[in-house]
Amino acid sequence: MKVALVFCGQPRYINETLIFQLNQLFFLNKYDCDVYAHFWFKKDKDYVYNTGPDSHLYDFKIDENSIDLFCQLYKPKGILVEDPPTLQDLSSREYTKYNTEHLQVLPTLSQITSLKKAYSLIDNPDQYDFIIRLRTDMLVVRCPDLNTLSKENIYLFSVKLDEAYIYDCFFITPPKYAKVLCCEIDNIDTMYDNGQRISSGELFLKNIEVNNLLQHCKLLPFSEFYFRIQRQGRTLHSMIGISDGPPQ
């Protein structure tokens, strides 16, 4: 089983070694893995990063040694690091027509731009059985054996019990669908012009829908996949999933 792990966005909490140990347990030590990453990063301990309003990260800074430590731990096959962008760096449009929270636009555009840049580092996606999108602040505590998954499906996770709210920063996909998922930024203007507001979760699902991939999507049940997100003060943000009820 050959797997590509794709990291993107901000290199948050690289120094939390439990996250790396869990990635070893579920991926790195279990399959033939290559790691690819694109990060927005400034080697300045006083630099305050832009974060989304739902992230609960305030006056957020990243350790200066984060990239060096990531390379030491994950030994990426491909990595690209760039200064954090402004909204003007990413687009000449303002994307305000459908948005109630304009501050969401920069985090959303930077996230999906970073994903495409990370995916573009993969010379030959078809060499992999699966391509997995992860976050550096994601603690995976349950994950299915990839050998049991169909290579005809995209595997997603929903973060609410009462509705299908698809989490946009994780997926497991065979390579034939990876370009659509990872290059969402290429379709953003078309989706926006057709009435879609710039919201990361909504865009992720709309991109799947307009590319006729919904029939290939499967939601991983809570009993098979679960994770938490590292937050400030060593707190963990719980992701509430569907299918099996709250975690035990």
Image (cartoon, rainbow, N blue to C red):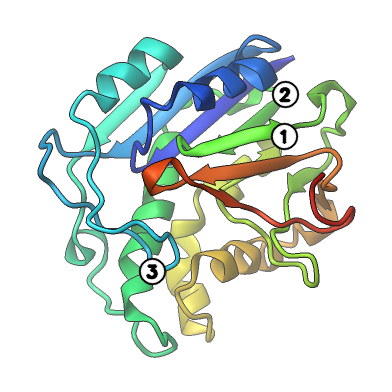
User: Disc 3 versus disc 1: distance between alpha carbons?
Assistant: 32 Å
Provide the residue designation for mark 3. 53
Under circle 2, the secondary element is: loop
User: Disc 2 versus disc 1: distance between alpha carbons?
Assistant: 6 Å
Foreground mark, 2 or 3, reads: 3
Earlier residue among tags 3 and 1: 3
The residue drawn where x is 54% and y is 16% is: 34
Q: Is residue 231 visible?
A: yes
Q: Which mark is residue 131?
A: none
Provide the residue designation for mark 2. 129
Q: In this figure, what is the number of numbered marks? A: 3
Disc 1 residue type?
Answer: Pro
Q: Position of residue 88 (x, y in %)?
A: 18, 66
Q: Note whether 21 is above or below 29 in the view shown.
A: below
Q: Position of residue 194 (x, y in %)?
A: 53, 84
Under circle 3, the secondary element is: loop
Provide the residue designation for mark 1. 174
Horizontal side of 58 relative to 55 (left or right) equals left
Q: Position of residue 68 (x, y in %)?
A: 26, 18
User: Disc 2 versus disc 3: distance between alpha carbons?
Assistant: 35 Å
Horizontal side of 127 relative to 15 (left or right) equals right
